[in-house]
């Protein structure tokens, strides 16, 4: 009886372990969409509002929602992947910053970035 319970629990947990290993790979030139979370951005490195205003930009975080971005560069520092994204339409973020960076797997899992089909 114990063996049967152990095998059934193992069979239920085995697919959960393999699901985390199957993250989509990011490549240069990949098109993604920015999605504004309910709170602040956690994994997309957005400058603070006072820095945007000091440089003459408009600090409207809601303007990021729905923007399509292209991955310009993929960087790996140890086990951490960072992607540099640029707007697909060529405009600057907040009229000041040409690129933004994001922590790749975390931004995808939190829903801040999502692939465009």
Image (tube, helix red, strand yellow):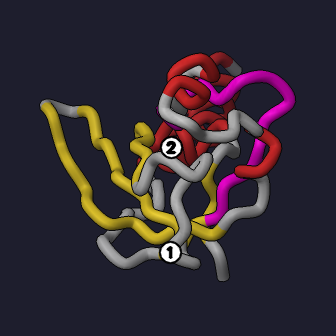
Comparing marks 1 and 2, which lies closer to the viewer? 1
Residue at image position (65%, 29%) is 41
Label 2 neighbour load within 10 Å: few <14, some 14-19, many 20+: few
Instruction: Check disc 2 and report the residue beneath it.
Output: 20
Q: SS at mark 2?
A: helix
Q: Which of the 4 image quarters holds residue 91?
A: bottom right
In the rendered view of the protein, which quadrant contains the N terminus?
A: top right
Q: Is residue 79 visible?
A: yes
In the image shown, does 110 or 12 lie closer to the viewer? Answer: 110
* Horizontal and vertical percent position of residue 101: 40, 43
Q: Residue furthest right?
A: 38
Q: Is residue 39 or residue 106 the one in the foreground?
A: 39
Identify whether 52 is placed above or below 15. Answer: above
The image's mark for residue 90 is 1
Residue 80: image location, x then y, percent: 27, 33
Residue 51 to residue 99: above or below: above
Q: Is residue 81 left or right of residue 54?
A: left
Residue 113 counted in the magenta span: no
Which span is picked out in magenta?
Answer: 33-45
From this view, report whether residue 90 is shown above or below residue 33.
below
Identity of the residue drawn at 30% across and 72% down: 28
Residue at horizontal 57 percent and vertical 47 percent from the top:
108
Viewer-proximal residue, 82 or 7?
Answer: 82
- Side (left or right) of 83 relative to 11: left
Query: Does residue 40 show up magenta in the picture?
Result: yes
């Amino acid at each position: 009886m114990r063996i049967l319970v152990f095998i059934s629990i193992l069979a239920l947990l085995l697919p959960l372990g393999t699901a985390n290993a199957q993250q989509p790979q990011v490549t240069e030139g990949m098109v993604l969409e920015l999605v504004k979370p309910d709170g602040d951005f956690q994994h997309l490195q957005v400058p603070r509002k006072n820095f945007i205003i000091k440089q003459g930009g408009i600090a409207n975080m809601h303007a990021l929602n729905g923007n399509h971005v292209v991955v310009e560069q993929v960087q790996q520092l140890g086990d951490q992947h960072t992607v540099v994204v640029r707007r697909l339409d060529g405009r600057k973020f907040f009229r000041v910053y040409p690129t933004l960076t994001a922590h790749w797997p975390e931004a995808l899992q939190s829903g801040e970035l999502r692939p465009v089909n």
